[in-house]
Amino acid sequence: MKITDLILKIYTVLFLAGIYLPIAILIFFSFNESRSKIVFTGFTLENYYSLLSNYAVWDSFYNSIWTAIVVTVVSVFLGIMISYGVTRYEFKGKNMLDILMLIPIIIPEIVEALTLLVFLIILGIRLSPYTVIIGHIAFDISFAYIVIKARMAGYDPQFEEAARTLGANEIQTFTKVTLPILMPGIVSAALIAFLQSYDDFIKTFFTRPPGFTTLPVYIWNMASRRGFALDLNALATFIVVISIVFAYVRLKVERW
Amino acid sequence: MSYAVELENISKSFGEVQAVKNVSLKIRKNEFFSLLGPSGCGKTTTLRIIAGLEFPDTGRVMLNGEDVTDLPTHKRNIGMVFQTLALFPHMNVYDNIAFGLRMRKVPEREIRQRVKEMLEIVRLEGFERRKINQLSGGQRQRVALARALIIKPAVLLLDEPLGALDLKIRQHMMVELKKIQKEVGTTFIYVTHDQTEAMVMSDRMAIMKDGVIQQIGSPHDVYMRPVNKFVALFIGDAINFIEGTYKDKGILSTDLGDLKVPQLEGYTGKTVILAIRPEKFFLEKNIPSDIDNVIEGRVIFSIFRGSFVEYRVELDNGQEMVIFQPYLVAGQKIYGDGSRIKIGWYRDSAVILSH
């Protein structure tokens, strides 16, 4: 009993360390004075200043945000529609649709990205920020679908009937009952879709036009060109913090 | 006389299945009316047609004398308590109850007053700010009731709302529902598969089977004068059937001998079923001198049920009877297994059912 407890504790600590230690080190060294990644010589915010004064960072940050917002809105909207249809109605090919919605999550992203690029070339579509957005939606919609469908599965259609017997018309029923009850699922789906898009590298890299840079792509460019610089540590820290905030919000919303 | 609800020749099919077959009903104002039957008998569909949640294939629905057959639910002014209750989880008790009035654009000041009154009626004063998941089963029941009643519906429809409660609370809620119905003076239509609920609460009830109404009547009527074997079996704890051929002058010829039965016209020569409730029998010394029928049997076993003793008795033709004897005096004699006993009953305690 005691020994297994101990083993479990050690394993847990090692496991969590494996995940979080690199991130912690990264954050730690983003405050390092010297360019060394091994020796901490002194605390400074210099890396953050240089980051904030870098126009290219702002530009790619802006691109990341606006594409993520468009992707999120479209994915969540379609996710609501499809999951509503699948949970509420019986139709031919329903199971097929359900499976098709999951496939983008299962297929390796590199394969998806490559096939998408080939597809775009065949159709003769020029790469643009919109091809990036299409690429993101093509699999973010699956995440939105899964999360919203899970919420809908526990949703009793009698809520809507109850609203109607109380005098609510279709629109009032949707806005006052259906939407508020599904809201935690929708918010959760939106956060996941946003993070997926905002974090994405492979798809963006394959489908972006020349000169269109998002944050992950920018980091890749910097890292591949001149190794890991300190302002890159600062930038990565920035991304991690945003992700953690989102994850935290999502956790809160789930518990509604 | 005007009725709260009238159904005229209502039929409804779902694909191949005909859920409701040519149902006609007239439900009086301020009546507690139950639709009773086993699952799949069409009672819930009938209720949903009154609510406008389903539309009939044929027939008409009238509310307070007005044809509402094609009117959507939200324009019908009906209240409904659902099986799952369907209380809005994102609202507190107050907002749930106020929902119907808000849809009707009633001023908030009046809403506050009416919610307060409603909470008094269902005895949930002080629960306004509670979340739905902080309420017990019985309390949720009351909120659902209050939410449906506050809009002063022409009729309140209840779809097995007590199904999820345990026995004690259910018994309590039955009486409570009946009281509330008397207090608010609204027509209640109550759907249930539980005959006890229907018997306890109803002024009248309709018993349904396979989408067809078998009998409409008061609890007394359906218990004492069931129209067929199905109703006789469905209502009450138990019933005994004896088959025979109807002779003239109220005599039934059976393999237990000739029995005196209710006098009826037009049954002569027909094979019929005599139905007798288990509490209608007298045993041994308790048999009055003017009794109409006496037969003999052997006690197979007895069950002490508290207020009465249940006997299983085998008759000479091998048939088994269920007999309830009230347990009136402490130490009262209980006939032992295997003992032979005389069984008597009055002719008018039994009912003739056609085969």
Image (cartoon, helix red, strand yellow):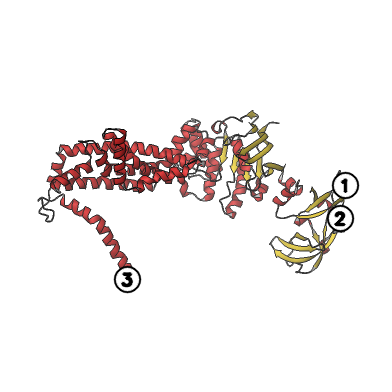
Residue A3, disc = 3
- Using the numbered discs, state the Cα–Cα distance from disc 2 to disc 3 in whole angstroms: 84 Å
**Cα separation between marks 1 and 2:** 20 Å
> In the picture provided, is B71 more to the left or to the right than A120?
right
Mark 3 surroundings: few (<14), some (14-19) or many (≥20) residues within 10 A = few
Q: What is the spatial separation of the Cα atoms under label 3 and label 1, in whole angstroms?
A: 89 Å
| Label 3: which secondary element | helix
**Residue B135 percent across, percent down from the top left:** 49, 49
Q: Residues within 10 Å of mark 1 (few under 14, many from 20)?
A: some
Viewer can see residue B110: no
> Residue under circle 2?
B292
Q: Position of residue B295 (x, y in %)?
A: 84, 61
Same chain under badges 1 and 2? The reply is: yes
Amino acid type at circle 3 is: Ile
Residue type at tag 1: Thr
Label whose residue precedes the other's in the sequence (1 or 2): 1
Chain bearing tag 3 is A
For residue A101, say whether it is visible.
yes
Q: Are marks 1 and 2 in contact (CB under 8 Å)?
A: no
Nearest the camera: B271 or A224? A224
Determine whether label 2 and label 3 are within 8 Å by CB.
no
Residue B129 in picture, x, y percent from top left:
44, 44
Q: Nearer the viewer, residue B128 or B225?
A: B225
Farthest residue toward the front? A122
- Residue at the spot of label 1: B268
- The quarter of the displayed image where residue A194 is located: top left
Q: Amino acid type of disc 2?
A: Asp
The vertical placement of B28 against B164, above or below, is above
**Residue furthest out toward the top:** B66
Q: Give how far across and how far down residue A134 sits, in percent.
A: 32, 37
